[in-house]
Image: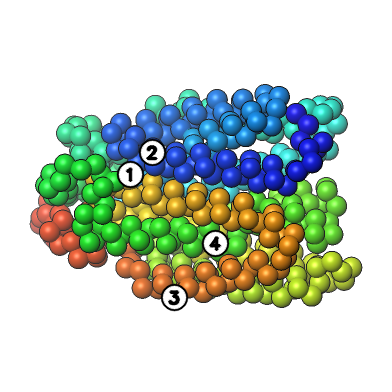
Amino acid sequence: MKLGATSDVTALIGATNGGYYAGGAFGSIFSGYFAHKYGRKKSAALAALIILISSSLIAASYHIAMFITFRVFQGWGSFQMLSTIPMWMAELVPPHRRGMLVQIHPAMINTGYTVASYTGVGFFYYTGGGKDTWRGPLGLAGLFPLLLLLGIYWIPESPRYLLFNDRKEEAWDVLRHLHSDPRDPNHLFAKNELDQIERQVQLDNAESAKSISGNYVKIFQRASFRKRFVMTIFLTFAQMSSGALVVNNYGGLIYKSLGFSNSAVLQMQGGYQLCGWVMNTANMFFIDRFPRNKLMCLGFATCGITVIIEAALQKHYLGTAYQPGLIACTAFLFLNVTCFGLFVEGPGFTYIAEIWPTFLRGEGYALGMCSLCVTSIIWLQSAPTAFETIGWKFYIIFIVIDAIAAVVVWFYPDTLGKPLEEIAGVFGDTDMVALVPQRDGSKSDSGNNFE
């Protein structure tokens, strides 16, 4: 496959990125239906299988059309996975540790980015593969989905999905094992959670029965659901408009414009991904200590500040040989992903999974990931041309969006520490909140100490 001999390489790079996210938009919407009907576990397994097959065929591509086609399927599988896993995790973990444990998801995404980047570095220096060296790292993309398929049998299904489908005994087994604690020999914490989820399922079923429409349609039939929809779409749009997405995908173009060699560009991309991983991992230790909305507000504000400085630096030093200025440009790209990883990425994934009721969580989360894909397509298709024509001025768009997001997200309701069954009350849906007497005689308390 001779991409280097093609006259319009920039357009083809845009097409491979755009095709990936177009497939991702479909995979996101499909996951909402599939995870709701067949379960979170089967949705993740199907996604892993799609990624495994498509990655193998991408590595075996003999023509750019074949390459782009299976990039679309790879995007489908990746975003079906991305739509399923955080929601599944949020439904498995206790409320007082939900943020920290769901934060593992973006941390592992960044682990994947980092491994991929440094794999690229390794294959750059490998000379034994000739013109087909590029196939190696792309084929390795199927390794981790394969590991998931091999181990998914031992991962529990969401107890909320199980109860929603009248599988109470299975749900009880999952909860009992998840919350097993020697300080709680009678499994009171698990029994209390089972009671609350069961009551919530009854309320959700009653709400769902008010309309025979599909779940995607039901989202628009109640004011509080429409509010969640708008919040979800705006939050994912803002996340992808913070500036980090464009640097992540077009870092090579940016670093080259700053004067780095090909080998240095690869090293910089690897370092950028490693920085994102470190920040997402660090976020695990404080995400459950501060309000979700305030953390994200801080993130958008600081991302905006770093982009302002980056734009100013590129205006003055891009195209020059002034090394301190070019180094400063690079540093603020890294500071941008630092702020994004610390305050925006993980809390955003967690928040979207928390705000939807169980019977709409799959569809609501899927719409958020679809918004993420559509936003990504907009920026990734426009970025190469924008960098060539208007240069640093392209960053002004991200500065404006970051500023708006910092203000808007401040007013989002906080979900910190609340059981999923009680979050409806934050949106005024008191008729959909399951409050049940606790088996120890106390009222419902999301701060139960049993973990």
Q: Mark 4 vs mark 1: which is more N-terminal? A: 4
Q: Mark 1 vs mark 3: which is more N-terminal? A: 1
- Marks 2/1 in contact by CB < 8 Å: the verdict is yes
Position of 293 with respect to 76 (left or right) is left
Is residue 116 at all visible to an observer of this figure?
Answer: yes
Q: Amino acid at mark 4?
A: Ser
Position of 17 with respect to 213 (left or right) is right
The mark closer to the camera, 4 or 1, is 4
Q: Is residue 212 above or below residue 298?
A: above
The residue at 54%/62% (across/down) is 241
The residue at 29%/62% (across/down) is 227
Disc 2/disc 4 C-alpha distance (Å): 24 Å
- Marks 2/4 in contact by CB < 8 Å: the verdict is no
Q: Amino acid at mark 2?
A: Ser
Residue 298 rendering spot, x and y as whole percentages? 49, 72
Q: Mark 2 vs mark 4: which is more N-terminal? A: 2
The label on residue 362 is 1
Position of 449 with respect to 198 (left or right) is right
Front one among 39 and 64: 64
Q: Quadrant of the N terminus?
A: top right
Q: Name the residue beneath numbered marker 4.
A: 241
Front one among 305 and 122: 305
